[in-house]
Amino acid sequence: MKVREPAVAGQFYPGSEEELLSMLNRFFARKAKAIASEVIAPHAGYIYSGQIAAESFKRLKKAKTIVILCPNHTGLGSEIAVSESEAWLTPLGKVYLDTKLAEQIVEKSSATFDELAHISEHSAEVQVPFIQYLFRDSKILPITIGTDNFDLLIELANALAEASKKTKFSLVASSDFSHFVPLKFAKQKDLKAIEFIKKLDTEGFYNFVTKNRLSICGYAPITVAMHYCKLKRRKGAKLVKYDTSARVTGDKSNVVGYASIIFV
């Protein structure tokens, strides 16, 4: 069995099962109703964004499979890369991949099977312990997106929508928002971008981010998720919580933004 070993355990999140469960127990101490099949969640270190991510996962409906759309920070591998591992390993154990769903996505889009894009990428991995904690029997399907080609993003969304007719799955778009800018600027621009997300204005969001060169690292996964949600006839999106790294560091001159957003 081909198993992906964790790349950032002990860095972005605790490397031991006991410490990781203790942190997750704190994140999920307050309950919320699971009302969404698609969410946006941040992927920074848990001390910075873990609670924000948990707010998304609390509201995510359980499904046989959780698709994770994430950016490609390493630049390695193909533009749209589906993990070809059979399982991923975290301190909480193994979680299996939905290989049948993976084949459907590769067949219907420009995505390819490529593990190189996943080996050192953290933005999908940090979501996995949340899934293991809440949905012990669910499978995952991590897909990295390293292209900003709008047509390819729409094509991927179309492939996911088509696949959803055969396989029921929930979806997580993994993204942080503004990176390393003053707090005032980050909040202003991030909340403007989130207004496009709320309205499911896919082109508006994509154009706003690209034309203004915003540092939202997962804007491509968010674009895919937005178009997918339009195809699934979602009515819009809701911002559950927004915060920045300043809450932890105290540095308001150089922040990263995080948002919990659910599609409803």
Image (tube, helix red, strand yellow):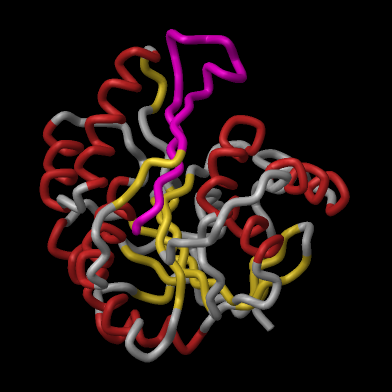
Front residue (pair 70, 29): 29
Residue 248's image quarter?
top right
Q: Does the magenta segment cover residue 250?
A: yes
Q: Quadrant of the N terminus?
A: bottom right
Magenta span: 241-264
Left or right, residue 215 beside residue 250 = left
Looking at the image, which residue is at 77% across and 47% down?
Answer: 25
The residue positioned 33% from the left and 37% from the top of the image is: 216
Residue 223 position within the rendered picture, expressed as x and y whole percent measured from the top left: 25, 54
Against 113, residue 196 (above or below) is above
Instruction: Establish if 184 lies above or below 36.
Output: above
Residue 70, given in percent of the width and then of the height, sits at 42, 55
Please say if 140 is above or below 91: below
Percent x, y of residue 34: 53, 61
Residue drawn at (33%, 84%) of the image: 163
Where residue 6 sits, quadrant-wise, is bottom right
- Can residue 74 be seen by looking at this rendering? yes
What residue is rendered at 34% in x and 22% in y?
A: 187
Asked whether, in this view, residue 250 is left or right of residue 69, the answer is right
Residue 245 belongs to the span the image colors magenta: yes
Residue 9 lies left or right of residue 97; in this view the side is right
Up/down of 83 relative to 205, above or below: below
Residue 226 located left or right of residue 170 = left
